[in-house]
Image (tube, helix red, strand yellow):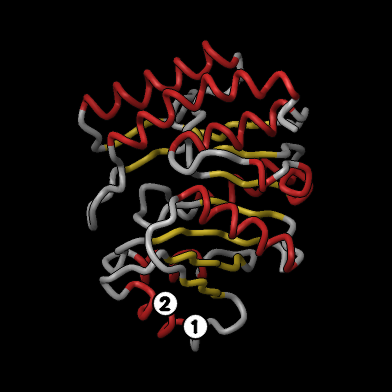
Amino acid sequence: MDKLVIIPTYNEKENIEKIIRKVMSLPGAFHVLIVDDGSPDGTANIIKGLQAEFPEKLHLVERSGKLGLGTAYIFGFKWALSKGYQYIFEMDADFSHNPDDLLRLHEACREGADVAVGSRYVRGGKVVNWPWDRIFISRGGALYTQIITFMPVRDPTAGFVCYRRHVLETIPLDQVRFIGYAFQIEMKYRAWKLGFRISEVPITFVDRTEGQSKMTKGIVKEAIRGVWAMKKFGRERAQ
């Protein structure tokens, strides 16, 4: 009951069993919470079939319909806190995040970081198989966020993160406003404004090879507008 990996899913039948088995194979007894938003492709049924194999370590929450990435993580954070987990991770289901790097994020927090971010844009980090326009949007968004907020995080939209328990206990989770990429920025921004130490761990981000991307124009627009909103409520010290 030390480490929990939260994985939101929507139509991930091609990836979900493989990602669960990989996480379960890691040393250090990682537990997994899947928050599934009513996947019509049967993702939840695959998870239920695996729960008999991992009865104490694999957990599933089913929600009715697509309620957004941010709300899935907020639900997962609250669930993790209620169960007593000390290290709480965010990770995608599609292997764009290498599960082996969970060990490195955990180690960064054990060595003193309050938040460890799997970063594409620090020395040693990189992106594989992304088209140039996606890289341009991502890198441009990161620079835009740094310029507006002054937050010293090179990869603010990163979704591969480890939080120590006390960070999520301190951030007012019910006040988190955004649900897409802006959610990822907001969580890091709130942690930074509250004085927590954020460490970026270089990772290789590999674009999914199976399933469909959840990126939409609306998510990008939310992030652009959201950065300005964060700048405003940042004056309240993110509380």
Q: Residues within 10 Å of mark 1 (few under 14, many from 20)?
A: some
Tag 2's secondary structure? helix
Residue position for label 2: 47
- Tell me where residue 68 appears, x and y as whole percent: 43, 51
Q: Residue reaching furthest top?
A: 147
Nearest the viewer among 200 and 215 is 215
Residue position for label 1: 51
The amino acid marked with disc number 1 is: Gln
- Tell me where residue 52 appears, x and y as whole percent: 49, 88
CB atoms of marks 2 and 1 within 8 Å = yes
Disc ID at residue 161 = none
Q: Which residue lies at the image location 51% right of the left edge and 39% below the top edge?
A: 178
Q: Is residue 61 left or right of residue 187?
A: left
Q: Is residue 121 above or below residue 166?
A: above
Distance between the alpha carbons at the discs numbered 2 and 1: 6 Å
Q: Is residue 198 left or right of residue 182?
A: right
- Tell me where residue 18 appears, x and y as whole percent: 36, 68
